[in-house]
Amino acid sequence: MAPALPSPPPLFTSTSQQDQPSSSSSPEQFSPPSSILIVGSGIFGLSTAWALARRDAFTQCTITVVDRCDPSNPDAFPAPDAASVDTSRIVRADYADKAYAALGAEAQVQWRKQAQPTDLGAEGRYHESGLLLVADSGPVRVPGEIVAKSDMTGMDYVRLSWANVLSLASDNPELASSIRELPDVAAIRERLGTGGSSGSWGYINEGSGWADAAASTKWLFDRVNEAGRVTFVSGTVSSLEHRGPTVTGAKLTDGRVLSAELVVLAAGAWTGGLVDLSGQATATGQVLGYLDLTEAEQEQLNDMPVVLNLTNGLFIIPPRNRVLKVARHAYGYLNPTLPETARLPSTSSPADQPISYPLTQLSDPSLSIPQEGVDDLRRALKQMVPLPGLVDRPFSKTRLCWYSDTPTGDFLITYHPQYKGLFVATGDSGHGFKFMPVLGEKIADCIMHNCPLEFVGKWSWKPDANVVITEDGSRGGKPGLLLANELGRTN
Ligand SMILES: Cc1cc2nc3c(=O)[nH]c(=O)nc-3n(C[C@H](O)[C@H](O)[C@H](O)COP(=O)(O)OP(=O)(O)OC[C@H]3O[C@@H](n4cnc5c(N)ncnc54)[C@H](O)[C@@H]3O)c2cc1C
Ligand SMILES: *[C@@H]1O[C@H](CO)[C@@H](O)[C@H](O)[C@H]1NC(C)=O
C-alpha cells in the first residue's frame, strides 16, 4: 500500500510551466538527471531509452529499464500481453488530425527503409500493402464546416484524413499518385479484391501498410542494446518510492528498490496502477481474432490492402503465413479492479478506488473474448472478406489487448503536475505503434522541456475530466461496456 502523505502534495508551478510553448523552454536550460528509470519496455519505454541513450545531454546519466517481462531474456521478451506485440500493426499517416498525420509521415520514412538487413523495414518487418479507409455517409456537411472532434463521424474522419495525406504528399508526385479516391461501392470492392465491401465512400493510400509488431519491437530492443548505455531489469514495480512530493524510484514486488532522480512511467494500460490517472487515461480492452487460412485462400488475399472501416472500427490486416487477423478499434471494455500495485497518493482520487485495469491471458489463461466482440469480428469478415467457408471458421486464437485511452485520443507525455522527478509517457489510445521509430525522440524532447509545439496542448496533463471516453472519431462499438458483464453473457 502507498504510504499516506501528511498533507496533499503541493502543485509544482515549475513543471506546469514546462509544458507551455515558450522560448524559455529551450533544451540548453535543461539540466539532465544523474539517473533515469523507465518503467515499461513497450514501444513508449524502449523508444525513450533509445533516444536518451543517443543524446549527448545524457552521457553522464545512467539509464535503466524495468519490465515485468525480462527484456534481456530472448524467450521472455516482448511481454506476451503488452500492447506492443503480436503479428501486426497498421502503419499510416492517414489521420484526421494534422499533427499526427505529419508524425505518421515522418515515421513512414523510417519504416520504408529496407536496403540493409538492419533497416527497420527489412526482413519482413514492414509491408506496404496499401490501406483502404472507408466509412458510411454520415450527416451532410457544408464544405469547409468545422466539426468538433467529439462530434466527428467515421466519414468526417475519412474525409479529413484524405485531405491530410494529400496535403502531405503535395510536393511528392509519386506519393500523391498512390492516394486514390474510391467514390462508390464498386470502386471499393474492386480495390479490396476480396469480393467484400459495401461502405459508401473511401480512399486507398498505397503508401501505407502494416508492420510485424513483435519483430519490430525486437528490432528496437536490439538498437537499444547496441547503444550500450541501458541496463535492463526484470521485475514488477509494486509502487513508486517518494519523499513527500518528490519521486525517488520504484519498489519491486520482490522488495528491491530501484532509485532514480527521474522516473519515466511508460507502463502502457497498467500505468494507472502506479499513479492516479483519473480523468487523464483509462485502460480499455479491445478484441482481436486470428483465422487460419488454406494456401489457396492466402494466395487469393495476397494483394488485399489493410482495410479499416471508420464507421464501426473494424479492421483486417492482410494475411501472412496463412493467418488472417481481424480486430476492432472500439470504445473497448472497462475492467474496474483494485490492482495489486499501489498508486501514488493524489489529491483528486483516493488510492483505494477501483480503476479500469488490464486483464489478460497471462494472469487468467482461461480468458476468452466476449461474445459481443466475437460477433462483431465475424461481421467484419462477412463484410470485408466473404470467402466461402471463412465467415464461420472458428478463430484459431483470440486476444484481449489493452489501450491506455485518453478522452481525445492524444498521448499523455508530460511531467506529472504534482510530483517532482516523475514523467509520464503513456495514453497511447490504441494508435501508438506506427510512431515507434520517431516517438522516443519526441518523448526525449518533452523530457528536455522542448515538446514539439504542435503537441504541447495535446500531450499535456489535462484539467480533470470525470469519465474518460475516447472521442476521436475513430471508434466503433458502444462506450462503457463492462468486461465482466460481457463475459458473463458468454456463459
Ligand atoms: C489490439 C491492438 C491493436 C492495435 N493496432 C494498432 C495499429 O494498427 N497501429 C498502431 O499504430 N497502433 C496500434 N495499437 C496501439 C499500439 O500497439 C500501442 O499504442 C503501443 O504498443 C503502446 O505501447 P506502450 O509502450 O505504451 O504499452 P505496452 O506495449 O503495453 O508496454 C507496457 C509495458 O509495461 C510493462 N509493465 C506494466 N506494468 C508494469 C509494472 N508494474 N512493473 C513493470 N513493468 C510493467 C508491461 O509488461 C509492458 O511491457 C494497437 C493496440 C492494440 C492493443
Ligand atoms: C463499414 O461498416 C458499416 C457499418 O457496419 C457497413 O455498413 C459498411 O458496409 C462497412 N464497409 C465495409 C467496406 O465493410
Image (cartoon, helix red, strand yellow):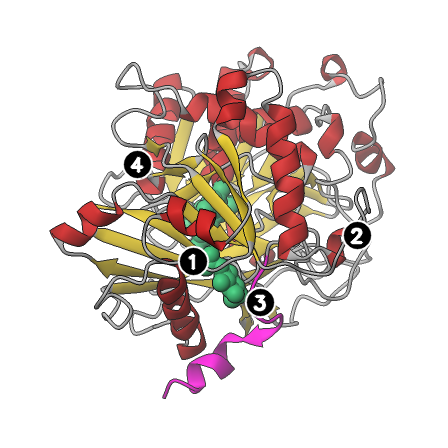
- Give the Cα distance between marks 1 and 2: 29 Å
- Give the Cα distance between marks 3 and 1: 35 Å
Q: Which mark is residue 197?
A: 1
- Give the Cα distance between marks 4 and 2: 38 Å
- Whether residue 393 is visible, yes or no, is yes
Front-lying residue, 24 or 307: 307
- Whether residue 328 is visible, yes or no, is no
Q: Badge 1: how crowded within 10 Å, few (<14), some, or many (20+)?
A: many
- Give the Cα distance between marks 4 and 1: 31 Å
Q: Badge 3: how crowded within 10 Å, few (<14), some, or many (20+)?
A: many
Q: Earlier in the sequence, mark 4 or mark 1?
A: 1
Disc 2 beta carbon < 8 A from ligand 2? no
Disc 1 beta carbon < 8 A from ligand 2? yes
**Labels 4 and 1 touching (C-beta < 8 A):** no
Front-lying residue, 73 or 452: 452
**Labels 1 and 2 touching (C-beta < 8 A):** no
Is 124 displayed left or right of 175 in the figure? left
Relative image position of residue 117 (x, y in whole percent): 26, 19
The residue carrying mark 2 is 148
Element carrying mark 4: helix
Element carrying mark 3: strand
- Give the Cα distance between marks 3 and 2: 27 Å
- Give the Cα distance between marks 3 and 4: 29 Å
Q: Nearer the viewer, mark 3 or mark 4?
A: 4
The residue carrying mark 3 is 356
**Labels 3 and 1 touching (C-beta < 8 A):** no
* Magenta highlight range: 475-491
Element carrying mark 1: loop
Q: Badge 4: how crowded within 10 Å, few (<14), some, or many (20+)?
A: many
Q: Earlier in the sequence, mark 3 or mark 1?
A: 1
Q: Which mark is residue 19?
A: none
The residue carrying mark 4 is 215
